[in-house]
Amino acid sequence: METVKLGGLEVSRFILGGNPFSGFSHLSPQMDHEQLHYYTCERIKQTYREAERAGVTAHIGRADHHITRTLMEYWDEGGTIQWIAQTCPEVGSPERGAQNGFRFGAKAVFLHGGHMDFLRLQGRLDEIPPVINMIHDRGLPAGVAGHTPEVFEWAEEHLDCDFYMCSYYNPVPRDKAPDNPGAGNEDRFRPEDRERMTSAIQRLSKPVIHYKIMAAGRNDPREAFQYAAGKMRPGDAVCVGVHTKHRPDEIAEDVRLLGDSLRASV
């Protein structure tokens, strides 16, 4: 599989997402519940191993106790997937999430997209540069995520990031809280958001990890990968979560679709 660089970290262009492992389906409360019951620690480790076999070298996972414990077991058993840690509001501040990443073996750390959206709307983005500096002081690539182009326009002017996590969609307002407790009840996946974000990506100076490309299962996978491949720049990657209960070969299929789409877009 092709690789890209996030600062000094080399990763596969397909990156395994982690939201389904923690029950964040962005589809419905019922699907959240199903994913929580399906993704035991053993099944998550099995999914990491399937990703390895498909040539995937990196996983984006929340810096919470559930994921860090599972990763520790997986690495102790010989696993090689590299962890890109996402800070998460339910654990605490971005600093706390970054510290979890340092403690449990992350190879890169980025700030949660909902938290970035929230701080922007609250006029508190000046809290972010010290966290980016803290990540860099530990020798790790640092990034920010977000669901609107405005987050990255600000980051271009005020941060020294190594990469960005750009969501194709802005599912819920983040003006009152950074997290999304009732995911799926209010989520909106609008085509115009995808167009706005992918247009903004072309102007960014850092590598971008494109995420939510399948609108949490609402988009046809073939169309989603073809669209993303047409918008990805040479140094960009995609992050895709999977729910293998219903599609056991989903990782291999998605990796194949990405490869086919990238070759067709040249």
Image: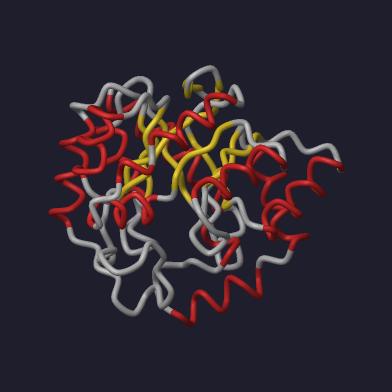
- Observer-nearest residue: 44 or 221? 44
Quarter of the rendering occupied by the N terminus: top right
Q: Quadrant of residue 65?
A: bottom right
Q: Residue at x 68, y 46 (%)?
A: 48
Q: Residue furthest top?
A: 8
Task: Specify the quadrant of the image occupied by residue 174.
Answer: bottom left
Q: Residue 255 location in percent, x, y?
A: 50, 39
**Residue 183: percent from the left, percent from the top?**
40, 73
Q: Residue at x 37, y 74 (%)?
A: 184
Quarter that holds the C terminus? top left
Color style of the picture: secondary structure
Q: Is residue 193 above or below residue 258?
A: below
- Asked whether 204 or 215 is in front, the reply is 204
Task: Give the total of numbered labels.
Answer: 0
Taking 19 as reference, is 148 above or below it?
Answer: above
Residue 236: percent from the left, percent from the top?
37, 28
In the rendered structure, the answer to whether residue 85 lies left or right of residue 239 reads right
Out of 141 and 53, give the one closest to the viewer: 141
Q: Is residue 36 left or right of residue 258?
A: right
Which residue is at 38% across, 46% downward? 211
Name the residue furthest right: 77
Residue 167, given in percent of the width and then of the height, sits at 32, 48
Residue drawn at x 52%, y 25% is 136
Q: Is residue 148 left or right of residue 12?
A: left
- Residue 88 versus residue 40 in the image, above or below: above
